[in-house]
Image: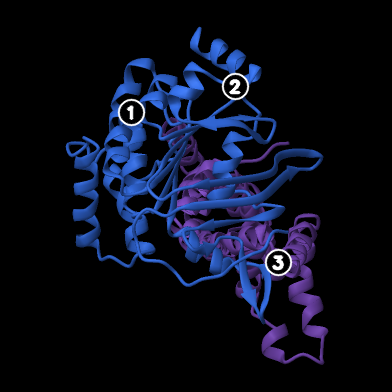
């Protein structure tokens, strides 16, 4: 394992992500292969690549939905999966992981809203249960966030009464309610009808422009990636094949694999 | 078979049968409360990631489900009191209490399976969303998983409750004075079988048919809301 450094919690604001020699396998299948990646605080990184290349798994290990097998991940100055016990680096306790995880949030392709709650209740739940806000404070915060994503008139609607684009915007508001320093987006427009993609991308544009958080997103919206990303990573077989500013990757990619992937995606 | 129906005799025994029916309903209702609560704990215990909880729970459920209720009842009522090393209050219970405990524990094991199916029907994404929101496991269960799992468990639970009601007369075997006990006692005293058993059967129908219809409606409603 690489050298692990420890330091105290850092204040709020966008946080950097540091991944070193991260390996993740499902049985025999190695999905992340000695992956090292640095994302600056406030940076917008878009990950592209063929399906099965491991790009979603990067987000899932940062979110702790899958645990890494080797290497380390730091969010800001804090180790995500490791802590120091008796002067020795060890795998972190659930308590430590929960503490660091409070800086991270994730939006999913299939929204994963709580179907038995209204839009407002979806957004209120975590601030009340995790951040200790009272009902009134959480309701006010939920209203502000749902207004921000253009759903101020849908507060009491259940997910079943909302369109796909509206559901995804509620999911984004729900994540924002946790005031994350790092936000992960996993193909958040892939499950939407084409005419609903724009409304979600507009919200993402606004978030990216605010610079309040570091954003990592997996997307097939190449136009959006080119417009919004500070950096694009081309991923293949559990490794970063190439990376660079959007213009470089989209106009003048280095690798044949990137060229053929972009050709296939852009021809659709 | 040639017999006659005696209306006067029927009117005379009906109040006693009704009293017996109240006992049967009471045993069932208390048994349901036990099954609903214990069943949920058994379902959670079986899903526990602590083997010292999940293995004994799974074993207990299988053991109870694999043995007849009547044997469990006889064990509690006749065999347990002979365990003289244990305190008497722990081993010797009145028939009424023995019956609702045995019925409740027996069906708690079935109820736990209904809960398990309901819990497993909640999509994995709901667990993952709870993780991304950093909810504690207790909050995830209480606020996210169970409010979705329990409504989906209600139709099978309802079927078990109807089955419990139909199993409750077994209590007559240990002298619980429910409707079957009263019908048998009436038959012994009068040597007439048709009226007591027919009326007992009709009383059961009067409760179990509406209950079964209610469960069917519940099933349709849950299926509709899950769409």
Q: Neighbour class for label 3 at 10 Å: few (<14), some, many (≥20)?
A: few
Residue for point 68% across, 36% down = A238
Residue A213, numbered label: none
Q: Are marks 2 and 3 on the same chain?
A: no
Please give the residue where the numbered disc 1 appears in the rendered image. Answer: A201
**Which percent across, then down, holds residue A47?**
52, 32
In the rendered image of the structure, the colour used to display chain B is purple
Along the viewing direction, whichever of B133 and B107 lies nearer the viewer: B133
Residue that protrudes farthest toward the top in the picture: A267
Does residue A131 appear anywhere in the picture? yes
Could you say whether the residue bearing mark 3 is in a helix, strand or loop? Answer: loop
Q: Nearer the viewer, mark 1 or mark 3?
A: 1
Vertical placement of residue B150 versus A264, above or below: below
Would you say B124 lies left or right of A201 here? right
**Which percent across, then down, holds residue B174?**
71, 70
Please give the residue where the numbered disc 2 appears in the rendered image. Answer: A254
Along the viewing direction, whichever of A143 and B7 lies nearer the viewer: A143
Could you say whether the residue bearing mark 2 is in a helix, strand or loop? Answer: loop
Vertical placement of residue A170 versus A83, above or below: above
Q: CA distance from mark 1 to mark 3?
A: 44 Å
Q: Are marks 1 and 3 in contact (CB under 8 Å)?
A: no
**Which percent across, then down, holds residue A16?**
45, 53
Q: Nearer the viewer, mark 1 or mark 2?
A: 2
Q: Which chain is blue?
A: A
Image quarter of the C terminus of chain B: top left
Q: Neighbour class for label 1 at 10 Å: few (<14), some, many (≥20)?
A: some
Please give the residue where the numbered disc 3 appears in the rendered image. Answer: B50
> Which of the chains bears the disc numbered 3?
B
**Which percent across, then down, holds residue A120?**
27, 47
Q: Are marks 1 and 2 in contact (CB under 8 Å)?
A: no
> Which of the chains bears the disc numbered 1?
A
Q: Neighbour class for label 2 at 10 Å: few (<14), some, many (≥20)?
A: some
């Amino acid at each position: 394992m690489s050298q692990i450094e420890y330091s105290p919690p850092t204040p709020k604001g966008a946080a950097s992500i540091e991944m070193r020699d991260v390996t993740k396998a499902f049985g025999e299948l190695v999905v992340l292969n000695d992956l090292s990646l640095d994302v600056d605080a406030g940076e917008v990184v878009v990950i592209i690549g063929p399906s099965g290349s491991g790009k979603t798994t990067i987000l899932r290990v940062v979110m702790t939905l899958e645990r890494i097998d080797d290497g380390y991940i730091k969010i800001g100055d804090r180790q995500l999966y490791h802590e120091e016990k008796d002067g020795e680096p060890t795998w972190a306790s659930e308590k430590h992981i929960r503490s660091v995880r409070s800086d991270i949030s994730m939006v999913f392709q299939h929204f994963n809203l709580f179907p038995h709650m209204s839009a407002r209740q979806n957004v209120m739940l975590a601030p009340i249960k995790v951040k200790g806000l009272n009902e009134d404070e959480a309701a006010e915060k939920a209203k502000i966030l749902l207004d921000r994503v253009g759903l101020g008139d849908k507060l009491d609607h259940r997910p079943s009464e909302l369109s796909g684009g509206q559901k995804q915007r509620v999911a984004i508001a729900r994540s924002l309610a946790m005031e994350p320093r790092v936000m992960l987006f996993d193909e958040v427009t892939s499950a939407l009808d084409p005419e609903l993609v724009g409304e979600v991308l507009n919200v993402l544009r606004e978030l990216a422009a605010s610079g309040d958080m570091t954003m990592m997103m997996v997307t097939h919206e190449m136009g959006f990636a080119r417009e919004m990303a500070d950096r694009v990573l081309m991923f293949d077989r559990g490794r970063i094949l190439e990376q660079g500013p959007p213009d470089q990757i989209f106009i003048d990619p280095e690798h044949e694999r990137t060229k053929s992937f972009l050709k296939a995606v852009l021809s659709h | 078979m040639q017999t006659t129906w005696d209306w006067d005799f029927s009117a005379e025994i009906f109040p006693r049968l009704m009293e017996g029916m109240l006992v049967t309903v009471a045993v069932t209702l208390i048994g349901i409360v036990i099954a609903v609560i214990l069943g949920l704990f058994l379902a959670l215990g079986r899903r526990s990631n602590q083997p010292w909880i999940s293995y004994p729970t799974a074993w207990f459920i299988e053991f109870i489900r694999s043995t007849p209720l009547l044997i469990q009842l006889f064990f509690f009522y006749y065999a347990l009191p002979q365990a003289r090393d244990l305190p008497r209050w722990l081993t010797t219970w009145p028939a009424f209490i023995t019956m609702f405990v045995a019925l409740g524990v027996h069906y708690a094991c079935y109820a736990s399976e209904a809960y398990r199916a309901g819990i497993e029907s909640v999509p994995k994404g709901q667990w993952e969303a709870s993780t991304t929101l950093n909810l504690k496991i207790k909050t995830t269960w209480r606020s996210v998983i169970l409010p979705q799992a329990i409504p989906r468990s209600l139709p099978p639970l309802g079927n078990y409750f109807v089955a419990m009601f139909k199993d409750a007369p077994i209590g007559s075997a240990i002298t619980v004075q429910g409707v079957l006990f009263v019908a048998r006692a009436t038959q012994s005293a009068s040597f007439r079988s048709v009226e007591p058993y027919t009326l007992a059967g009709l009383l059961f129908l009067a409760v179990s048919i509406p209950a079964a219809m209610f469960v069917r409606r519940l099933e349709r409603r849950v299926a509709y809301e899950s769409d």
